[in-house]
Amino acid sequence: MTRNQNDVLAVASQSGATVTFFDAVTYDRLGEVAVPREPHELCFDAARRLLYCTITYRSGYYHANGGRARELAVIDPDSRRLVDVVDLGPERGPHGIALDPSGELLWVSVEAYGDESGGLLALDAETLEPVRRVPAGAPGPHWFVITPDGRRACTANKEAPFVSVLDLASGELLDRVALPGGSEGIAVSGDGRHLYVAGPKADFGAGAPVRDGGVRIVDTATGAVAGTLPADGYVFPVHVTATGLLLAGELRTTEGDSALGGQAPGLLRVYDGAGRQEPARVPVGAFPLTITSSPDGRYGYVAAVVSSTVTVVDLAAATAVATLEVGRSGEPGAHGLAYVPAA
């Protein structure tokens, strides 16, 4: 599928409490929808023409927040209106979100359930009623992926030195893939043979140096780390395109006294699927936090939360072709992304 006229890019702004819509071809701003405070990630359901948005915190972000939220906003992306806000309580801190390959279950990662650690919550995609919960066996599961066969999920755990491998049918914790220092973003190859996990978890305190930062390549058959794609700074988002390219967003830090330190413009690293080639490097906004791509794999989109921008990258040319301003001018915020093909 290629980019078509009337395709739309949706972007969540966590500080602006909005989801903004851009024309995916001309990059014109089409409008925005107000949602509850602190929207984080987006997921488009093509079968029902709905856009789901997780509301993760009452204020702030993972490292420093004003309490975990528990809502899921439902948006009609064609009329650009909020149609529902679903209360997921007593689950708290919903963040990552994905449909299973069948399109029948909407999975959401949650950071906590009462006094229990986090896990994955399955919602019936028609009713949005909870039908299953799978514990991750770790605190702070944040991002996750579902394998292409729909049988397993893998959660990146900020506070645990491993990635959890979960059986979605039985709810069993099948494996713990060792990742000392915790992990950030996670992606899976199109054939399901490899996981790509960003780590370690970022530590912004006291100008702490990055140790062994980069993307781990995990063999899903054995659960072994087969290699590392090194980076100079912390890596947060990772994404695999339809053509098999691996995209990784690297932070570049400076001296700063905020909880997130000082953030300089970041980098998008573009690898071939196996990471065998030296990556192309494309400058993007400050603190790249989410990546998605067009259905044909030609364009990458990098949301940067500190600069509150989305950089549009021509992946074939490894060149930025547009920068989209998101949310309120001068305020951080750009986070979740979803590509919405025309009806």
Image (tube, grey):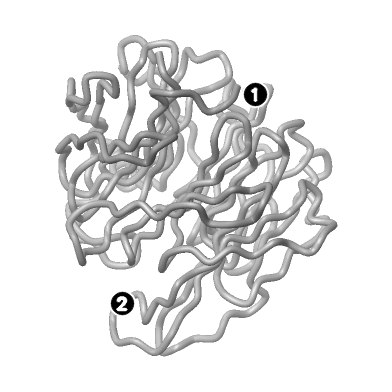
Q: Quadrant of the C terminus?
A: top left
The image quarter in which residue 81 lies: top left
Q: Amino acid at mark 1?
A: Arg
Q: Residue at x 63, y 36 (%)?
A: 297
Residue at x 52% of width, y 60% of height = 236
Left/right placement of residue 288 relative to residue 145 reads: left
Which quadrant would residue 198 be assigned to in this image?
bottom right
Where 13 sits versus 50, above or below?
Answer: below
Of labels 1 and 2, earlier in sequence is: 1
Question: Residue 151's mark?
Answer: 1
The residue shown at (58%, 69%) is: 181
Residue 33: x and y in percent read: 18, 34
When the figure is inspected, residue 260 is found, relative to residue 306, above or below; the finding is below
Badge 1 local density, few (<14 within 10 Å), some, or many (20+)? some
Which residue occupies the foreground of this view, 39 or 20?
20
Residue 259: which numbered mark, if any? Answer: 2
Query: Residue 218: x and y, percent?
Result: 75, 50
Q: Return the x and y of residue 93 as percentages of the image width and height.
A: 31, 46
- Circle 1: element type: loop
